[in-house]
Amino acid sequence: MTLQDLLDSHCMPLDASQRLDTAAMTPYLQLLDGWQFEDGSIRKTYAFGNYYQTLAFVNALAWVVHREDHHPDLLVQYNRCSVAFNTHSAGGITRNDFICAAKADAMFAQGAAR
């Protein structure tokens, strides 16, 4: 599994049988910079120069995750946005969460919101 594998993948309907335990999450977390498992979700905070850039990121992310039908919890502040993914239908973390996290990172790296 590579970062490119995640970027090329799309979310699928999943249930509790596809939930990842901590050991199974480790390789995924090692692929993604800055993501951490906390409180039942994988989380990362992105920093921006101003409110406009923050909202542009939120809007771009909304478009990406809507296409994947996998929506995160967001905490939007003036110059940062915290993103938390988990798979509600599975009651935990699944590969879908890492697919969307990788896509969020790629979008941020490309400067889609800056």
Image (cartoon, rainbow, N blue to C red):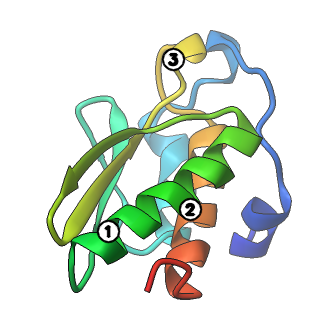
Near mark 1 (Cα within 10 A), the count class, few <14, some 14-19 or many ≥20, is many
Q: Which of the pair 30/67 is nearer the observer? A: 67
35 with respect to 7 (left or right)? left
Question: What is the secondary structure assignment of the residue under circle 1?
Answer: helix
Looking at the image, tell me whether mark 2 or mark 3 is earlier in sequence order. 2
Q: Give the residue at mark 3.
A: 88
Say few, some or many: other residues with alpha carbon within 10 Å of mark 3 (under 14 / 14 to 19 / 20 or more).
some
| Amino acid carrying mark 1 in the image | Thr
Secondary structure of the residue carrying tag 3 is helix
Marks 2 and 3, how far apart at CA: 22 Å
SS under mark 2:
helix
Give the residue at x 51% y 17%: 88
Percent across and percent down for residue 76 are: 23, 52
Dot 2, how many residues are within 10 Å of its Cα: few (below 14), some (14-19), or many (20+)? some
Q: Mark 3 is on which residue type?
A: His
Q: Which residue corresponds to the image point at 57% horizontal and 42% vertical from the top-left?
A: 97
- Kindly identify which residue carries mark 2: 60
Q: Is residue 112 visible?
A: yes
In the picture, the disc for residue 54 is: 1
Q: Choose the circle earlier in sequence order: 3 or 1.
A: 1
For the point 73% across and 20% down, the residue is 14
Q: Nearer the viewer, mark 2 or mark 3?
A: 2
